[in-house]
Amino acid sequence: MVADTHAEQPALTPGSSRRTAQEPPPQAVMGLLNYITATSLDEDYAHVSEQRRRSGDVTQKRRPGTVGMAVLAVFGVLVATAAVQTSRNADQSASSRASLVSQVNARADVLDRQRTTAQELQREITALGDAQLASTTEGRSLESRLNRLGVLTGATAARGPGVQVVVDDAPGAKSPKFMVQAPDLQKLANGLWTVGAEAVAVNGQRLTSLSAIRDAGSAITANYVSLRPPYTVSAIGNPKRMGADLLDTSGGQTWATLQSFGLKFDVNTEDNMLLPAAKRVALRYAHEPERRRP
């Protein structure tokens, strides 16, 4: 019996082609994952596109509606309002700054004029006082006393003979043990007062009863002014006695010990020195001493 050549053949799926029994399917050649990645997306898009074409649902661009136009209009108004307000604020800030600068300059001019007036009045007061004191014997005695008190308190400049003591760190000193410290200068100044100094200054800073010599970080300050080594301590007094008597004080003995650590300590006599007046002298209170009964 001869087989019918028109026997039933397997149906072909859409999008597939007739292949021989010996030809393997694409997914077997490409690999299942690569085949799905390469074909599934395109087929899905084609399927959706075909459905939209059949149903006549073709998406068209629509113009924004009334609500959208209203939102855009409101947004534009807000942007314009913000821009106008920013411009106004900038103008007001510039105007305010110019006004403040003008006021500061005007007040500075007034202050300068008042300072000049105060200086002129102070010179007039000083001249009138000197003339009044020089006019009588009692006045001249009072003037002499005032000058002496001014020297002792540091309120006026002092001139005369005395000694200069120059102290400094040890050469190449890196440790505070070999450097001049604030207490070292304090002891030296107090020793000079003890031996009869009438006026004392450290690197040009006049010392008074209100002065302070302190350590401030890596520097030493006197009257809140930083000092740099070497430190020159000038004292007006009897130059013949002060230098020798200083070594008998506790301050002099301290420096005799510091010399053994390499610190510099030189005492020199001077025939004429000028020590400036203290810049900050404020009278806090005063009282008349009680008189002893005879």
Image: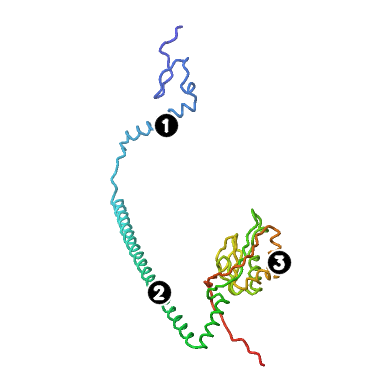
Amino acid type, mark 1: Leu
Amino acid type, mark 3: Gln
Identify the disc placed on residue 10.
none
Residue that label 3 marks: 253
Q: Position of residue 56 (x, y in %)?
A: 30, 36
Residue 127, picture quadrant: bottom left
Q: Position of residue 33 (x, y in %)?
A: 49, 28
**Residue 46 vs residue 133: left or right?**
left
Q: Which label sits in the foreground, 1 or 3? A: 3
Amino acid type, mark 2: Thr
Q: Which label sits in the foreground, 2 or 3? A: 3
User: Marks 1 and 3, how far apart in space?
Assistant: 102 Å
Q: Is residue 92 above or below residue 171?
A: below
Residue at left offset 57%, top offset 61%: 228
Q: Secondary structure at mark 3?
A: helix
> Circle 3: is it few (<14), some (14-19), or many (20+) Cα within 10 Å?
some
> Circle 2: is it few (<14), some (14-19), or many (20+) Cα within 10 Å?
few
Q: Which label sits in the foreground, 2 or 1? A: 2
Residue at left offset 41%, top offset 77%: 120
Q: Quadrant of the C terminus?
A: bottom right
Residue at left offset 64%, top offset 62%: 266
Residue that label 2 marks: 116
* Count of numbered circles in the view: 3
User: Marks 2 and 3, how far apart in space?
Assistant: 50 Å
Mark nearer the N terminus (2 vs 1): 1
Q: Is residue 107 above or below residue 178?
A: below
Answer yes or no: do the residues labelled 1 and 3 have beta carbons within 8 Å? no
> Circle 1: is it few (<14), some (14-19), or many (20+) Cα within 10 Å?
few
Mark nearer the N terminus (1 vs 3): 1
Residue that label 1 marks: 41
Q: Position of residue 119 (x, y in %)?
A: 43, 76
- Residue extending furthest top? 1
